[in-house]
Amino acid sequence: MTTEPLLAGRELLQLYAAPTGPTQALRGVDVTVFGGRISAITGPSGSGKSTLLALLALRERPAGGELRHRGTLVSGLSRRRLQRLRRQEIGWVAQRPTHSLFPQLDARGQIEQIARLRRVRCDALALLDEVELGARAGALPAVLSGGEQQRLAVAAAAVGAPALLVADEPTAELDDDSAALVLRLLRARADQGSAVVLATHDARATAAADTVLRLRHGVLSGVVDAGQDHTTTIDGQGRLQLPEEALPLFPDGRVVVTVVDGHVELHRPE
Ligand SMILES: Nc1ncnc2c1ncn2[C@@H]1O[C@H](COP(=O)(O)OP(=O)(O)OP(=O)(O)O)[C@@H](O)[C@H]1O
């Protein structure tokens, strides 16, 4: 892992227009993304995962808060600079993989086109082989199965180990063997220095991550680093959000809080 974050978001807010008034898709999210690591964003449907990915991949600007890319405020970057960063440094796998593929290019052409845009050399057939698509090199996205499209979209995003590789549900359509191929490719890119960020509902993908960020109702409810304790934030009113796995311990929502010798204990009331 590199010590300087590639991306650092503070108090990120995103709003979308809705018939009933603006929807707060993200509310006060703090997030840090490092090269060399896989981060998985989890949470129920509608919790803001895709929205956070769109901000991190510099596809949308936050409505509030502060997002820095290599220490520079994203709000200060021109549209042209953002476009160049997206093209050259950011791999993107959309929730619907065809949305991140060129419809008119075959599988081999997809890889070669991305390599041209990123100005890197890439053995397209070898990369397609890594996701077991070597035999489909001449196929257009429209004739590939959902799982093949997904593997192709991940392979294309991974060309040249971009500084950031962002994937929305990259294993959703995949059986265990194919999911393992995709996760192996993502790990290989992280080992080459890419910051890999996934939104996922898939336990296979969260198990492969170094850090798991949980979103609930647009709020970051917890961050777990592999092999470490749960970390959560305390808001300005002193409230903290318990990890989901702790909630069944307090079925009626009541808790006794005791401060003992510099730490806090939570008990179910007698
Ligand atoms: N372009 C948009 N316009 C209006 N509302 C949006 C838009 N994108 C997202 N939202 C709303 O923002 C909230 C968060 O959506 P988002 O897609 O980020 O959630 P998610 O966790 O990725 O969900 P899923 O797991 O179902 O993909 C939802 O209430 C959604 O309806």
Image: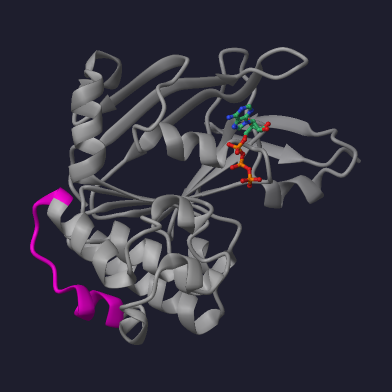
Q: Is residue 71 left or right of residue 13?
A: left
Q: Position of residue 75 (x, y in %)?
A: 30, 15
Q: In this view, does 216 lie to the left or right of 118?
A: right
Residue plotted at (15% across, 50% down): 118
Picture quarter with ligand 1: top right
Q: Where is residue 207 in the image (x, y as percent from the top left)?
A: 49, 66
Q: Can residue 255 be seen in this view?
A: yes
Q: Is residue 192 above or below residue 236?
A: below
Farthest bottom residue in view: 135
Q: In this view, does 209 lie to the left or right of 190?
A: right
Residue plotted at (24% across, 28% down): 82
Q: Within the image, what quadrant is residue 266 found in?
A: top right
Camera-nearest residue between 202 and 86: 86
Q: Is residue 242 above or below residue 96?
A: above
Q: Can residue 5 be seen in this view?
A: no
Q: Give the range drawn in magenta.
A: 117-129
